[in-house]
Amino acid sequence: MFVEVAVDFSDRDRLRTYTYAVPEDLTVQPGDLLWVPFGYRPIQGIAISVSETCDTDNIREIDSVVDDGPFISQHLLRTAVWIADYYRTNIFRACVPMLPPGANQQLHIWVSRSELAERVDQLLTGFSISADQHAVLNELPSQGRIRRDRLVRRIGRSRERHLDALVRNGIAVEESIWERPRARAIYRTYITLPEYGEQAKLTAEAYDRRRAYRRAELIRYLANKAKPVSRAELTTEFGNQIVKAVVDEKTVRLIQKREERDQSTNYIAQDAIPLDLTPEQKTAVDIITESILEIPTLDSTNYTSNEGASSKFLLFGVTGSGKTEVYLRAVEACIAIGRRAIIMVPEIA
C-alpha cells in the first residue's frame, strides 16, 4: 500500500505531495497524521490519499502513524487542497487549522552524558575536548537527560556546534522521542437490543410480568427506534438507574461508536437577517446606487472613454455607525445589474 503525504515543508509546488510506502504492520487512512523520513530527518505529514500501486521505484516507508486518527475528514481534506491553491500555501499548513487542539505530535531530542563523559580528560582516542566543549558538557545533568532545545537556550546558539562535536565524539548521546499527542479519539456509548422484532416484544412482556414497567418501556423505546440509541439519550429519558438495570441484566447490548471530528457536521447555515437602514445609511446607499446605475458598462454602445465614468465617495462615520452595511448594499446593487465588486479590507496593525 502507498500513501500520498502532504508534509510540513515549503515547496515551490504548493500542491505537491510525496509518495511513501506503508509497512505491513501499519494501517493508514486519509486524514491520518504521520511521521515520514524527509531528507536526513523525520518530519510530520498528513495522509491525503491511499492507493494500492505506485509507478515509482525505491519508495521510502513511513516511520509511524499518530494514534487515534484520522483527524481530518475527507471533505475537509478537499477543502484544504482548495485553500492551499487559492491562498498560495502548502497543503499541510492549510490542514493545520482543521486539526483538533493537541493533535500535532512533537519530536523532542533529548541529550545525556555517555560513559566517556566521566573520563573525558583521559580519552583513549588521543585527543582532549576544547574549553568550549567542556563548558557545554558541564551544562549536561550528571544524571538523567535534558531536552536539546532547552540546553541550546541555556548555552546559546553560538555554542551549539560544540554540542554537536560532543555528540559526534560519543561524549554526549542524543535520543529522539515523539511526544504523545494530547488529542484523543472521542467515543460515545450506544445501547441496542440483541434482537429486534418478536424477541424484543417478549423481553418487554417479561418485564411487565415482573412489574418492571419502566424497563419494559425502555425496551419498547429501543424497539421502535430500530437502531442504537446513545446512552445519554436513554439516561435523560428513563434515568440512570433504569438504564443501569437493563445493562446489568444484559437484556441490552453496549457498543462504542467513534465520533467524527468535524466541527461543521452539525452546523446549520442561517440566512442573513435583513437590517432596516437608518435615514443616514439610506441616504448614502441611494446616492452610491444612483451613481453605479449611471456608469456605462464596457460593452455599452455609447461607451467612449473612462472620463466621467466613475465616482468616488468618502463614507464618514464613527465605529459601529453601520458603514459596512452601506458597503454591502452597494455591492448588492452592482451584482443586481450583472457587475462585480470587491471590498478591500486594510490590515489593522
Image: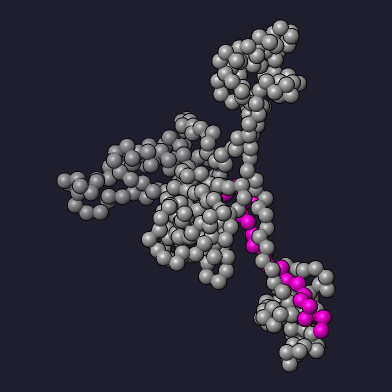
Residue 137 colored in magenta in the image: no
Say above or below: 42 vs 237. Answer: below
The x and y percentages for residue 84 are 45, 55
Front residue (pair 332, 287): 332
Give the left or right position of residue 94, taking residue 114 as reference: left
Asked if residue 251 lies left or right of residue 308, the reply is: right
Residue 48 position, x and y percent, is 47, 52
**Of 110 and 196, which appears nearest the observer?**
196
Total marks placed: 0
Membership of 98 in magenta stretch: yes
Residue 41, placed above or below residue 278: below
Q: Position of residue 46 (x, y in %)?
A: 52, 54
Q: Which residues are magenta?
A: 97-119
343 vs 184, nearest the viewer: 184
Q: Residue at x 57, y 61 (%)?
A: 63
Q: Work out whether 299 lies above or below 159.
A: above
Task: Please tell me whether residue 294 is drawn above or below residue 52 in the rendered image.
Answer: above
Q: Residue at x 83, y 73 (%)?
A: 142
Name the residue rendered at 80%, 88% in the picture. Answer: 121
Tell me if residue 349 can be seen: no
Which color scheme did the rendering employ for the protein?
A: one colour
- Quarter containing the C terminus: bottom right
Q: Quadrant of residue 129?
A: bottom right
Q: Is residue 107 visible?
A: yes
